[in-house]
Image (cartoon, rainbow, N blue to C red):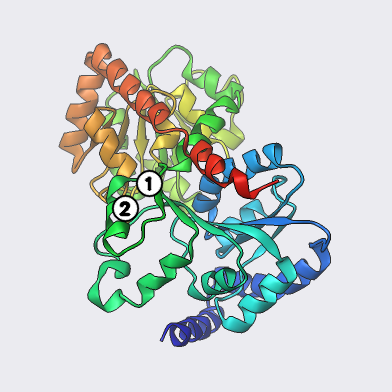
Amino acid sequence: MYNLAINLYSFAAKVDSLFSKKVKTMLKGQRDTFDVLRTKIDPKKEYIWFHAASLGEFEQGRPLMERMRVEHPSYSILLTFFSPSGYEVRKNYEGADVICYLPFDKPKNVRKFLDLAHPVMAFFIKYEFWKNYLDELTRRHIPVYSVSSIFRPDQVFFKGYGKNYSKVLRNFEHLFVQNNLSKDLLNNIGINAVTVAGDTRFDRVLQIRQQAKNLPLVEAFKQDKITFVAGSSWQPDEELFIDYFNHHPEVKLVIAPHVIGEDHLQQIISKLKGKVVRYTQATLESVLDAHCLIIDCFGLLSSIYKYGEIAYIGGGFGVGIHNTVEAAVYGIPVIFGPNYQKFMEAKELIECGGGFTINESNDLNALLDRMLTDKDFMKSSGQKAGSYVKGRAGAADIILNYVKDKLR
């Protein structure tokens, strides 16, 4: 049944590629994988394989890869992606020796991939449970680990009809999960090689904070004013906070929309009353009297949060919120919409008093009014957010300490 599903998935992707540039790019990348491995894999070297579905999973695995490179330099790193949104952004990442797409989980592809890559160890990040790859790694006695995985009762592994598929989890030498619920769920189906290590994203955001860029344009824009940073915002988010800040010109507003398309940017600009400057068109002089700075390029958001006193994380009125800890690491309170239930860190930020959820404009207005008039409340909320992130770091240490005996 599993192989039938994979074949149907592969066929559907081929059909979809006729209409989707993203899927077409993925399939071409998969076709190139074996040539990449033949050309770049050195048969005399030992490779540790990291697999990430996309960019978010890559960021979770990155602290491990970079620590592995420093602490065990005799090994080379193979990095694979399934999604173009990960590969196309990180295909030139200097922390890996070989980077390519992972072909569909068909038995022939799996054997060919492992014959060429010959990894000595593998790490699958978060939700990657490809049965044929895992089965074959086990048959070849190659240890494979699940990193930063998180499990919920509604997943197929814990349903009566998913009993057979749950056996795929037994292929992991060890599962490093994010929370106790995940450990309990796995224990209940007889999987006991489990450690609650937390989420390596906390290690990564602390690393990002240390490496944050200094941005003179943002600093000049901010001056000494309280600054609200809206990261990865969508239209429903923008409709709420833009209305508020149109009536509060004393607060600086930075918007980094999730979609940076000209139509969307013009839509945002049309709703704002004060002076608006786009980052790519800004000068040190033009930002001084601006009310809103729109970040119309990629790669800056994680550094921009350090200039804010309050952060808003977009996506909570759609499929789900974006990265909350990327902002919380700077010790500022984070606000987000109602669709956060699948994100453990968002729930824990609310519990510790460093995060806040809103359902409508009245919620946001009341919360911002309180923060802007009660600076102690705003400051203490931010401190709680920052302490939460620091307190959850260390997953990379736990994982590397566990596997070090299997490495030279």
Q: Position of residue 272 (x, y in %)?
A: 37, 35
Q: Look at the numbered disc 2 and give the secondary structure of its residue.
A: helix
Q: Nearer the viewer, residue 58 or 118?
A: 118
Q: Nearer the viewer, residue 13 or 280?
A: 13
Decide which of 172, 386 is in the foreground and name it. 172
Which mark is drawn over residue 182?
Answer: 2
Circle 1 sits in a helix, a strand or a loop, which is it? loop
Q: 300 or 95: which is nearer to us?
A: 95
Q: Residue furthest front?
A: 405
The vertical placement of 2 against 229, above or below, is below
Give the image location of residue 142, x and y in percent. 61, 64
In the picture shown, does residue 310 fall above or below 133? above
Amino acid marked by disc 1: Gln
Q: Residues within 10 Å of mark 1 (few under 14, many from 20)?
A: many
Picture quadrant of residue 187: bottom left
Amino acid type, label 2: Ser
The quadrant in which residue 137 appears is bottom right
Residue 34: % across, % down = 73, 73
Q: For mark 1, what is the residue?
A: 178
- The Cα atoms of the two marked residues, 2 and 1, are separated by 7 Å
Crowding at label 2, few (<14), some or many (≥20) Cα neighbours within 10 Å?
Answer: many
Answer with left or right where residue 252 lies relative to residue 70. left
Q: Which mark is residue 73?
A: none
In the rendered structure, the answer to whether residue 240 lies left or right of residue 406 reads left
Give the quarter of the figure containing the N terminus: bottom left
Identity of the residue drawn at 30% across and 75% down = 162
Q: Are marks 2 and 1 in contact (CB under 8 Å)?
A: yes
Residue 319: where, in percent of width, then height? Answer: 32, 57
Give the residue at x 17% y 28%. Answer: 366
Choose top left, top right, bottom left or bottom right for residue 226: top left
Q: Residue at x 69, y 45 (%)?
A: 95
